[in-house]
Amino acid sequence: MDHDIHAFLESALVLIKQVGEIVRENISKEKTVDLKESRVDFVTETDKEVEGILINGLKSIYPNHRFIGEESTNESNKVKLTEDPTWIIDPVDGTMNFVHSNPCVGISVGLYINKEPKLGIVYLPVFDYLFTAIENEGAFLNGNKIQVSQVKAFSDALIFIEGGSSRDPEKVQCMVDNFRTVLNEAHGFRSSGSAVYNITMVAKGAADCYIEFGCHAWDMAAGATIIKEAGGVIMDPSGQPFDLMSRRLICASSEELAKEICSKIKQNYPKRDDA
Ligand code: IPD
């Protein structure tokens, strides 16, 4: 079946601009915060409101499509990726930042068809940065084509690495070891607190690599199309092919750089999103 991906993009953009306004309006206000899986894993009323608008809006246009949303996923509604067109949504990526009124927050909408990434939209509303990509058509920031950097060596790279929201001692130890490796080997490292901010910065050549264990499908789905279309790579941190459900990610400006970093970092295997 043929799908009109350009029409999908246009429909999603109308909604994303609407919810971008909501995030911008609320970022400096006081928030009602609930805890999720750990003492540093949050959800706010804005996360829920934005996800509701995006899913209900897209569902009304595409009733046969499927949806995976961060805030509607739980033990009784688990993540299940099928061959059907599936919108994978993070309403506010960087909720910790949002709670602290830090501007590194993004709205992330990815579309998978036949379990492959076809369309990615990331909007960083406070910066008014809109990243879009359709498979085989390039990646764009506010309508201008973007490209990853030329950096190929770990020693020359600016790396995003995140601690994530798990405080499991084994995971924490792995991250401490990896932070040390990156600090010793790379040009520099950064943690923005938003997976989609990190991926899009690598896509636009403002950083060279991003690595994380513990992010979710909704943190990576839109970025998967954007990074590939910007000329970069996305893979499993073991060097194997990327698996959206694995909660493991490395994306980089080149395969050479990603593989060098993969060979030097310690591995961690969080519980899969589809387990
Ligand atoms: C989180 C952020 C954070 C990353 C976590 C994500 P959320 O997303 O992207 O940077 O380290 O793994 O879960 O919960 O703010 O949408």
Image: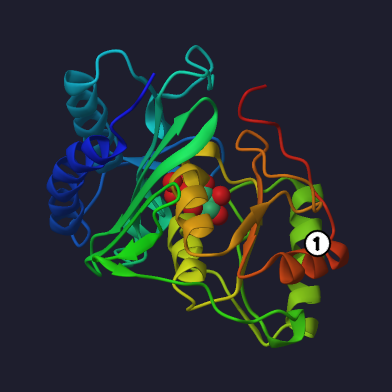
Q: Is residue 159 above or below residue 2?
A: below
Instruction: From the top left corner, tell me how far across and down residue 171 is, in percent.
Output: 76, 50
Q: Is residue 198 left or right of residue 2?
A: right
Q: Position of residue 12 (x, y in %)?
A: 23, 39
For the point 61% across and 29% down, the residue is 273
Q: Position of residue 137 (x, y in %)?
A: 39, 54
Q: Is residue 251 shown to the viewer in this render?
A: yes
| Quarter of the figure with residue 179 | bottom right
Q: Quadrant of the N terminus?
A: top left
Name the residue at 58% across, 46% down. Answer: 215
Which amino acid, by three-letter code, is at mark 1?
A: Cys
Specify whether 246 is left or right of 71: right
Choose between 94 and 138: the one closer to the eye: 138
Q: Nearer the viewer, residue 99 or 78?
A: 78
- Visible residue check, residue 41: no
Query: Where residue 11 sits: x, y (%)?
Result: 18, 37
Ligand 1 closer than 8 Å to label 1 CB: no
What kind of colouring is applied to the model shown?
A: rainbow
Q: Residue at x 25, y 70 (%)?
A: 127
- Of all residues shown, which one is farthest toward the front? 2
Residue located beneath label 1 in the image: 262
